Image (cartoon, helix red, strand yellow):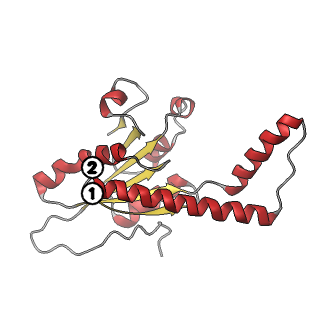
Amino acid sequence: MSDAPQTDVPTTGTAEGEEPPYDVVVLVEQELSAGDAERIAALHRGITEETGAVVRYHLLLPVDDAAAAVHAAMGSMASQDALAAPAPPPQDLAEVDGALREEAQRRLGASLDAMAGAGAQAAGATVPGPPVDALRSTVSAVGAREAVVITERHVVAEFLSVDWASRAQRHLGIPVLHLVEHETFAEQAGDPGGVTGL
């Protein structure tokens, strides 16, 4: 049994002479905007036009860590009072975790709507564990030919090559494209932290 998140993209067989689907796994840090979705879809329109292959997107959106969120909030309050942040009770963590999962589902739904608005066939899943592990297992499970990682700009992480895209490139045997959310291709190409990969 696979550890890959289930993205529910239809896995219809290909008829004889029909081009197999072109599966792309997309790891997103935040909810996709309409512009982000359009840029992703634009990357692959030529594939369908040239080969007839249907491009299928598998979106993965990480769920924020409840303990980290609670500790960060309590830490900022504690620093104002110059006190150490106490460990939150388990029921508080469970409540925060539930709220974070609901928020991740909402953001995933909005991202899938954005992809549909861009004319793309997409399904997705939220990821409660390490994002790059989920990316790797999903790429393997669906036989993806490409991965796209969309994040905010993380200058230090990118400089040290410990960001998601750099880590994915080391572990996947397929092209990995790193895009910065809410920036056009031209904006990203003019900055070394923008379009990377391939």
User: Left or right: 143 with respect to 32?
Assistant: left
Callout 2, which amino acid? Ala
At a point 30% along the width and 43% down the height, the residue shown is 39
Residue 136 showing in the rendered view: no
The disc, 1 or 2, on the residue closer to the chain's N-terminal end is 2
Q: Which mark is residue 86?
A: none
Whether 10 is drawn above or below 171: the answer is below
**Residue 41, numbered circle:** 2
Q: As drawn, which residue projects farthest toward the top?
A: 190
- Which residue is drawn at the image coordinates 12% and 68% (left, top)? 18
Seen in the picture, residue 198 relative to 51 is either above or below; the reply is above
Q: Is residue 98 above or below residue 1?
A: above
Residue at 34% in and 50% down:
174
Image coordinates of residue 59 in percent, x first then y, are 41, 58
Which residue lies at the image location 47% right of the left edge and 40% below the top edge? 166
The answer to the question of whether label 1 and label 2 lie on touching residues, with beta carbons closer than 8 A, is yes
Identify which amino acid the numbered label 1 is placed on: Ala
Mark 1–mark 2 Cα distance, whole angstroms, equals: 6 Å
Element under disc 1: loop
Q: In the image, 29: left or right of 20?
A: right
Count residues near mark 1 (Cα–Cα under 10 Å), then give few for <14, some for 14-19, many for 20+: many
- Label 2: state its secondary structure: helix
What residue occupies the far left of the structure in this picture? Answer: 17
Where is residue 98 drawn, in percent x and y? 65, 65
Q: Quadrant of residue 198?
A: top left
User: x, y (%) of residue 73?
Assistant: 75, 46
Residue under label 1, please give it.
Answer: 120
Total marks in image: 2
Answer few, some or many: residues within 10 Å of disc 2's Cα (few below 14, many 20 plus, some between 14 and 19). Answer: many
In terms of depth relative to the viewer, which is nearer, 38 or 9?
A: 38
* Residue 100 lies in quadrant: bottom right
Q: Nearer the viewer, residue 194 or 83?
A: 83
